[in-house]
Structures are given as C-alpha cells and as structure tokens.
Amino acid sequence: MSDNKTHLRVFSTYSLADAGLSADTPDVTSYRMGSVAELLGVSVDTVRRWADGGRLATTRSESGKRIVEGAVLAAFVAGIAQTGELKNINVESARNHFPGIITKVLKDGVAAHVEIQAGPHRLVSLMTREAADELQLEPGMLAVAAVKSTNVVIELPRES
C-alpha cells in the first residue's frame, strides 16, 4: 500500500470525523475500482470519473493499480448517500442481503450502533457491544446487512 494519501472531497458536509475516523485512523482495508463500483451499484467508469474529478481519493497499490482506502470509501459513500446521488441506481437484494461498506460504528457500555451504506441504501443495526467487538466492526469494512423481519443482522462475507 502506498503512503501518499490524498484528501477527500465530496459534495456534502459528511467527513471522516462523522464516520468516527481521523486522518490518523489506520485503514481497515482497501478496495479496487471494480469492487467499489460493484458495492455502489455503478459502473467502473463512474468510479474512475469520481476519482479523476477529485471526488474520490485513490492511492496506488504496490502493483500500480488504483485503490480506495476503506476509511475514505466509508466517508465518501456516506457523503454521496446524503446528496441523494445514488437514488436512481437499481440495486437488487438477494434474499434480503445487502452487501456494503460500514460507514459508522458507535459503541457504549452495552450497545453498538452500526451503519452500512449498500448502494443507495443506508442501513442501521443496533446490536450488543459484545457482538460488534466479536466481529471487530470498523468503518471501511465490507459487510453484509441481512434483513430479517424488523431486525438488521450484520454478517461478514466469507473468504473465498
């Protein structure tokens, strides 16, 4: 991973701090451009336009591929979701499972509040702090919100 970080610019007031992050927060993971496109339900060309236009900060992997740091993606998707920009995107759910990026994790002594941006959908799950700690949930992680009745269950994708 590259050490040269660029600054994020989005058309909203949502920031890394809003996601519970700072510029010094270690990145949980990074995503290739195709993965970002798939998660947001847009084309790779759209993601490239966002990056080329300075809206989505990217870095280069050791192999030279453009990547988006997880913390940057979390702030970006939360920001564009607030603008309504993703409302016209068709995102389908398979059996009420919504893959997305964790944008916020707030914990207190007993409970945890976890937000996931899955395409144009912002999903919120309230769970025990113990469950959030056990899953090691952090902004920028890929996760799946499984909606069952009135509950949203957070699952992590299986390693393939």
Image (tube, rainbow, N blue to C red):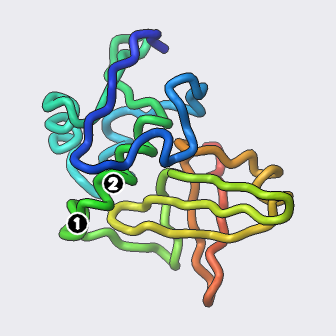
Disc 2 residue type?
Leu
Viewer-side residue, 129 vs 15: 15
Q: Which residue is mark 1?
A: 89
Q: Residue lying at the far bottom in this picture: please name it.
A: 149
Q: Residues within 10 Å of mark 2 (few under 14, many from 20)?
A: many
Query: Which residue occupies 62% across, 69% down?
Result: 125
Disc 1 residue type?
Ile
Q: Which residue is mark 2?
A: 40
Query: Which residue occupies 35% across, 61% down?
Result: 119
Query: Which residue occupies 49% across, 51% down?
Result: 101
Q: Residues within 10 Å of mark 1 (few under 14, many from 20)?
A: few
Q: Judging from the image, what secondary structure is the residue with disc 2 in?
A: helix
> Could you tell which of marks 2 and 1 lies nearer the N-terminus?
2
Please state the horizontal and vertical placement of residue 15, each as a whole percent of the image. Answer: 40, 42
Q: In the figure, residue 150 lies in which quadrant?
A: bottom right
Image height of 112 relative to 101, above or below: below
Q: For the residues marked 2 and 1, what is the alpha-carbon distance in whole angstroms?
A: 9 Å
Q: Is residue 112 shown left or right of residue 4?
A: right
